Image: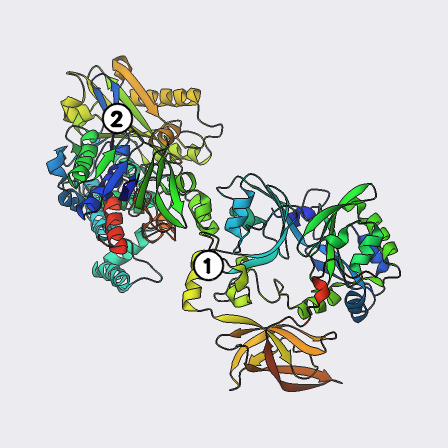
Amino acid sequence: MNGRADARADERGGVSERVLGTAFHARTAAASKRNRWHDWNGYTVADCYTAADLEYFAVRNATGVFDLSPMTKYRITGPDAWAYLDRLLTRDIAMLEPGRVLYAVWCDDAGKVIDDGTVFQLADGDYRLCCQERHLDWLQDAALGFDVRVQEETAAVAALAVQGPTSCAVLKALGLDGVEALRPFRHARFALGDGEELVSRTGFTGDLGYELWIDPARAEALWDRLFEAGRGRGIAPIGTDALELCRIEAGFIQAGVDFLPATGIVRPGRARSPFELGLDWLVDFRKPNFNGRRALAKELREGSRWRLVRLDIEGNKPAHHAYVFDRRRRQVGFVTSAAWSPVAKKNVALATVARPAGEPVDTLFAEIYYQREMHWSRKMAACRVVQDPFWDPPRRRATPPADF
Amino acid sequence: MSRPRHDAVVIGAGHNGLACAAYLARAGLDVTVLEAAERVGGGAAERQLAAGFRAPGLAHLLANMQPEVAAELELAKFGLATVCADVATLALSPDGDHVGLHGDRLKGPVSARDHQGYAELRSRMLRFAALLRPWLNRRPPLLVNGAAGDKVALARLGLDIRRLGRREMREFLRMIGTNIYDVLDEYLTDDRVKGALALDAVLGTHLGPRSGNSVLTALYRLAGDPGGGPGTLALPAGGMGRVADAFAGAARAAGARVRTGCPVARIRVDHGRACGVELADGERLEATLVISSADPKTTVFDLLGARHVEAGFARRVHHLRMAGNAAKLHLALDAAPEFSGAPPDALAGRLLIAPDMDYVERAFNPAKYGRCSEQPVMEITVPSAADPTLAPPGCHVLSAVVQYAPRFLEDGWDDERTGAFRERVLATLSAYAPGLRRHIVAAELLGPADIERIYRVRGGHWHHGELALDQFLFTRPVPGATGYALPLEGLWLCGAGTHPGGGISGAAGRNAAAEILRREGRR
């Protein structure tokens, strides 16, 4: 039985279809002016609270607060925990140490990506893995032969992402002394009130930002203190719509959107390898063994089939779900994420194309359909393949960040 | 000081390990075989019951022997001989009205219809088993990504099935996946004969006669030829230990070193390649190839460590069905056992306690729920009746395969439960041989937990894994290791857990050696 079902178990011990509120629900519900919600991993989360563009600008210009409690979290403990992760993840985890966060992907034996996520080393032999989808069955099967325990702790840890240029200042005002010294992909515990909270310098916005991992019992009080501390620094709660725009600008891929977890795929050829998602840098063949190594070594020799590209598209009409064509008007792929980027002033997209299409100099075309007063139009928009994220400000990495 | 580097170390000196070593040494490789026990042979080794009483450890008959192995390794030169190359079977009946089965004939009080039905069934089963035979002596072809040779082999199988003729082909395809209970009902009416044949189909498996797949296991048993013709059973001269010694002799003569009493603690891995083994006493042997005749679970989880293979592969190995269901009874007797109504020469053959098919099925029922049979089925031999050297003058050794004794009991195995089951076994046996208990000098019952411990087989399954359609041929032991190579450079399997499976045949060791030489190249 997976954790999702556990979280939804009703009073009689059966599985209910009730969608739960997060530990912040009383606060998020009060903040919601639009009453627009959706189900994320079995929890109610806001699409937006006021308007997506306002929330987006809170992240880019001040501080946006996102309730990321439904993010799937696994606790991996035991004497073999390091060896377990070393075999599970495709990248070298030698730099993993207490206080460190690592972005990583993991594959099945066929070298196809199951999910991406972040690994926190909390202590020696004690790790937290955060990811988009649920994978308890795979993670536990992968534990066969290891002295390791894998438990779902999604419901046991509430989380807030605090993102944007003033976020460090907000956290300092909250009372997190020394948070400005926290470097990207590091985490630390900070005294707060009568407790201690785990804070990591991570996020899904491509901006300066932090994530707070807290005891659900203290969630509401923390929310109140956080917004109190953020007054005057432009703090605002943000929903999934604004976050989605931020992550596309940052060029981050998302499971279930830009690729599908290999464990859930039925049709052959629909799964993707790390090479096909532009994650070559996360695969380290110096490791003698990891899940998917043999298949990936073969793929490296024989060539990959797909490529994930970032597209800069002419015009201003988002290329949602557009087919992608090459110069000779052959269909070579499709867009998986698209948006008009306010901060980059570009029409951007993430797309999957069949190699050899998608080389850096390639010109591709997106077939965009759009509607104006009931009438549909079609446009073949030229696209430039770009290498860098559309938004990657220096403040994302600056330590200490600027004060406000 | 530089340690000597071997071309190959073989883990386990069972007959498959020894056969593999013999073939590799013949090809010029420097091979060392490492055996944990004090003597070679594994499941073919003999056990000393009491002074002068030598019992066959696990296997007590040669059933699956492949003539190719015996001929190529010149096993006769190293002591392999049979006292009886075509052992007769007596299907025991509680009322003493026994029926003999020998070759394609029945002996005893059965109807003309059964005589005819039996001959017809036997010839058909042998014809189908003959289809399997060429497959047992080669690497199973790969269904996907196979080489041209694999495609030819697959086409050949299709052609061979087609060549049976329309009627026989239909019958083959119908029977292969069905159960022995229904098949026997179609051909025979005599309960004793059906019971005996049903037992043959389910020996050493977690199957009852009504279980699907039990025709395949019956065919597998008929696909060998220990010398008396296809599908015969043989008793080796000098006992099973002599068979083990013959394999060891062949290996040594080819130049392989065979070391006993040195259990391997782990397989060593260097940068994703097997590079040798470490013994329990800490000694390290370096080798270019490590070949394990241990079962796949022991090899992957205990000797290698799951971290050296990928998760999906480890999961497949973990899910191998290899929980044993058979126990082994050994009795040292101060006189010849007397089975009521049985002719004296029956002791030189084999005697079956499986009076009808429902009896066998009922014996199986509790095994599904983690309990031993109330009334077990048995395959009995008295090796000393055929070869008096196995016991002191006038004395005898009785060996019986007893089912069902599932490896995983509701409450687990302990001395008390083993004792209780032994009592049940002796009670069942006494119903057919009333005076038996008075003559027992020594007795031992090896339950599957004992077999697991003594023979170092996870689950105590003497085929190192159920022989079933999902663990047979193209998928034995698991996808990703069907060509004897484990998914780690330099590491191979050659035991009963690989294709074609268990039984004293040496085919797995032979096929593995051929594949190793083909893939790794001769020196």
Q: Which tag is nearer the camera, tag 1 or tag 2?
A: 1
Residue shown at 48% from the left, 50% from the top: B311
Q: Which color scheme is applied?
A: rainbow
Q: Label 2, on which residue?
A: B399
The answer to whether mark 1 and mark 2 are in CB contact below 8 A is no
Q: Nearer the viewer, residue A165 or B117?
A: A165
Q: Is residue A125 left or right of residue B94?
A: right
Residue type, mark 2 in image: Ser
> Between marks 1 and 2, how big is the CA–CA gap?
48 Å
> What SS does tag 1 mark?
loop
Return the residue found at the far left: B77
Q: Chain of mark 1?
A: A
Front residue of A196 and B197:
A196
**Residue placed at 31% from the left, 31% from the top?**
B262
Residue B324 lies in quadrant:
top left
Q: Secondary structure at mark 2?
A: strand
Mark 2 Cα within 10 Å, few/some/many (few <14, many 20+)?
Answer: many
The answer for which chain carries disc 2 is B
**Amino acid under disc 1:** Ala
